[in-house]
Amino acid sequence: QVQLVESGGGLVQAGGSLRLSCAASGSIFSIMGWFRQAPGKQRELVATITRGGSINYADSVKGRSTISRDNDKNTLYLEMDSLKPEDTGVYYCYADPWPITGRRYWGQGTQVTVSS
């Protein structure tokens, strides 16, 4: 059974930093990544990373964020610096299993609140 469990969210002041973790189990994963959803807005992609380490960032977080993964521990990370109030939202990790099945798994989400 595949499970994704996020941790590391919380309340932080603008300009601060946060590190999110996503512990995955039950499969080997190809692409993993983070989405976020602000109140009243659609879920948006934050960053993705392939098993081989190819990375993409949304323009809104580029230069302020670092996505990484530890394939041995099956864990995904997102470090965010210079946080802004507009970074507030629920952050969800996702993982696509390998071999590719067409199914995507999601974590339960972790709240990040950035105060001004």
Image (tube, rainbow, N blue to C red):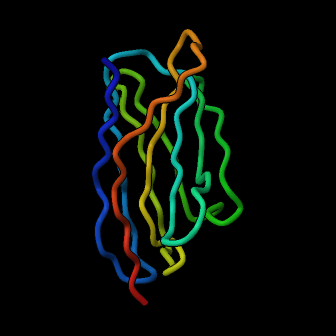
When asked about the image quadrant of residue 112, the answer is: bottom left
Instruction: Name the spot of residue 104 as percent of width and height, x first.
Output: 52, 28
* Vertical side of 27 occupied by 37: above or below: below
* Vertical side of 105 occupied by 18: above or below: below
- Identified at 61% across, 63% down, the residue is 61
Could you say which is closer to the camera, residue 74 or residue 112? 112
- Identified at 28% across, 50% down, the residue is 7
Q: Does 32 sit left or right of 25 as displayed?
A: right
- Identified at 51% across, 47% down, the residue is 34
Number of numbered discs: 0
List the single residue furthest toward the top: 99
The quadrant of the picture occupied by the C terminus is bottom left
- Identified at 33% across, 76% down, the residue is 12
* Vertical side of 11 occupied by 2: above or below: above
Instruction: Name the spot of residue 33 as percent of width and height, x first.
Output: 53, 41
List the single residue furthest toward the front: 40
When asked about the image quadrant of residue 91, the answer is: bottom left
The quadrant of the picture occupied by the N terminus is top left
Instruction: Name the spot of residue 51 as percent of width and height, x first.
Output: 55, 24
List the single residue furthest toward the bottom: 116
Could you say which is closer to the camera, residue 67 or residue 104? 104
Q: Does 46 sit left or right of 116 as displayed?
A: right
When asked about the image quadrant of residue 25, the answer is: top left
Q: Does 56 sit left or right of 26 as displayed?
A: right
Instruction: Name the spot of residue 115 as percent of width and height, x first.
Output: 39, 85
